[in-house]
Image (cartoon, helix red, strand yellow):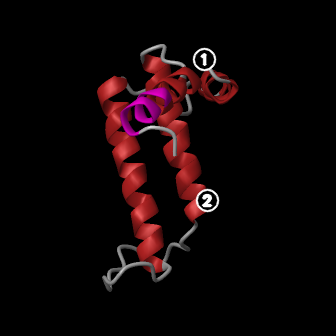
Amino acid sequence: MTEDQLIVKWLRKDLEGHWPHPGPLDTWVFLVTEIGEVGDAMLRLGYGELEYLRNSQKDPDIKHELGDVYLMLCTLANHFDIDLSEALEERAAHFKEKYGQL
């Protein structure tokens, strides 16, 4: 488990009773929702061709939204006892083997 995953684990424990503890599937839904909010923030900042404002009251903050994505990704990994650093290293090795050194 990465240091970030431990931070999320203890944050959830500290906020027990004040913050829901979703199961793995609900956590995945929250993760996908947060990813959508990153896209929404980018659109409101003028990235892309769409003229779409889901919530013009909300200031677009990509750093905030990416933090939420990472928090939910760590939460999901924690559900399955997956170390994200190991997962990243394995996938990087896979792509290096598949495509060669870049």
| Res 22 quadrant in image | top left
Badge 1, how many Cα within 10 Å: few under 14, some, many 20+? some
State whether residue 58 is above or below residue 84.
Answer: below
Q: Which residue is mark 2?
A: 63
Residue range in magenta is 93-99
Q: Is residue 95 visible?
A: yes
Q: Kindly report the secondary structure that dominates the magenta region of the rendered protein.
A: helix
Q: Residue at x 48, y 27 (%)?
A: 93
Residue situated in front as seen by the camera: 4 or 16: 4
Q: Residue at x 51, y 72 (%)?
A: 58
Badge 2, how many Cα within 10 Å: few under 14, some, many 20+? few
Q: Is residue 56 visible?
A: no
State whether residue 2 is above or below residue 40.
Answer: above
| Res 100 quadrant in image | top left
The residue positioned farthest toward the top in the image shown: 81
State whether residue 21 is above or below residue 70.
Answer: above
Secondary structure, mark 1, is: loop
Magenta span contains residue 96: yes
Distance from disc 2 to disc 1, alpha carbons, whole Å, reads 23 Å
Residue situated in front as seen by the camera: 56 or 102: 102
Magenta span contains residue 29: no
Please provide percent x and percent y for residue 19.
53, 33
Q: Which residue is mark 1?
A: 1
Q: Amino acid at mark 1?
A: Met
Q: Amino acid at mark 2?
A: Lys
